[in-house]
């Protein structure tokens, strides 16, 4: 598959530059604020994984209960820094899943898939009124996918690393003094790194005390990648429970 990065990357860079140019920061210094969130995320990998051209395809179950049975470990953390209307956003994701099964012509096999991603983005915050703020962001998501299929014959253990451009929107709505709803969505890939990547997340957040929030929600992260015979079309999806520190 031929990657053609020029047009999507140019559009992304132009959009991000335009947003940052409108941040409206005065010449005098403004204080920075930020937050760090760590989540427990009940998300395994669901989808189909083909490590090499002609190799068997391993399917991971997509129902929540079966995905959680496949899950070995998952970790999710985000960070946000803001100065005036200027916003910087980061997201780190790790998930490892494995399962045993049967592949044609009836051979026992075990498979493992580990996904790691790092998203870095920047953009501008808009005040939508009614206690709602909207962050419009552009950036990059780096992926590292490691897989393995073990059969009675030789084992196959390919890996892939690539970077996707993304566009994102983040909406925070205050419901009361202590409750808020946070929604996030992004889309990217555009055939540069993956064919397509996207994610969506929503959390309900409760302020336990000054600078400390507890969150409960759901997140879905998907990627469709194919290169050199390696194909991974899968997603991580499930509930999350988080702790946010503001400073």
Image (cartoon, rainbow, N blue to C red):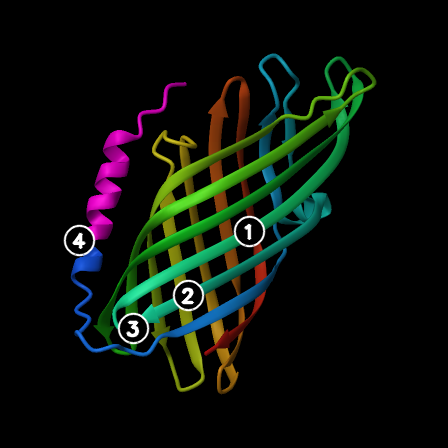
The residue pinned by badge 2 equals 80
The residue furthest front is 28
Looking at the rendered structure, the secondary structure element under dot 1 is strand
Would you call the spot at circle 1 few (<14 residues within 10 Å), some (14-19), or many (20 or more)? some
Quarter of the picture containing the C terminus is bottom left
Q: Report the front residue among 74 and 138.
A: 138
| Residue that label 3 marks | 132
Marks 3 and 4: in contact by CB < 8 Å?
no
- Residue range in magenta is 1-17
Can you see residue 88?
yes
Quarter of the image where one finds residue 22: bottom left
- Magenta span: chief secondary structure: helix
Q: Is residue 174 left or right of residue 129?
A: right
Q: Tell me the distance, in whole angstroms, between the alpha carbons under discs 2 and 3.
A: 17 Å
**Residue, x 41% and y 71% (percent of image)?**
181
Mark 4 — residue?
Answer: 18
Q: Marks 1 and 3: which is nearer the front?
A: 1
Q: Are marks 2 and 4 in contact (CB under 8 Å)?
A: no
Q: CA distance from mark 2 to mark 1?
A: 15 Å
**N-terminal label among 1 and 3:** 1
- Pointer 1: what residue? 93
């Amino acid at each position: 598959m031929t990657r053609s990065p020029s047009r999507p990357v140019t559009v992304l860079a132009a959009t991000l530059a335009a947003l940052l140019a409108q941040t409206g920061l005065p010449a005098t210094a403004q204080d920075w604020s930020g937050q760090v969130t760590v989540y427990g995320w009940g998300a395994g990998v669901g989808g189909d994984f083909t490590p090499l051209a002609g190799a068997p395809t391993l399917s991971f179950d997509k129902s929540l209960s079966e995905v959680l049975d496949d899950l070995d470990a998952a970790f999710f953390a985000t960070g946000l820094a803001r100065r005036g209307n200027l916003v910087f956003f980061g997201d780190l994701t790790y998930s490892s899943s494995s399962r045993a099964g049967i592949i044609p012509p009836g051979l026992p096999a075990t498979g493992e898939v580990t996904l790691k991603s790092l998203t870095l983005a920047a953009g501008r915050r808009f005040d939508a009124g009614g206690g709602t703020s909207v962050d419009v962001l552009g950036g990059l998501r780096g992926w590292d996918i490691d897989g393995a299929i073990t059969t009675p014959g030789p084992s196959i253990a390919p890996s892939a690393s690539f970077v996707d451009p993304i566009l994102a929107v983040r909406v925070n709505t205050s419901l009361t003094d202590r409750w808020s709803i946070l929604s996030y969505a992004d889309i990217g890939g555009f055939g540069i790194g993956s064919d397509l990547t996207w994610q969506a997340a929503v959390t309900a957040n409760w302020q336990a005390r000054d600078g400390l929030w507890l969150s409960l929600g759901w997140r879905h992260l998907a990627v469709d990648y194919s290169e050199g015979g390696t194909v991974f079309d899968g997603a991580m999806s499930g509930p999350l429970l988080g702790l946010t520190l503001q400073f």
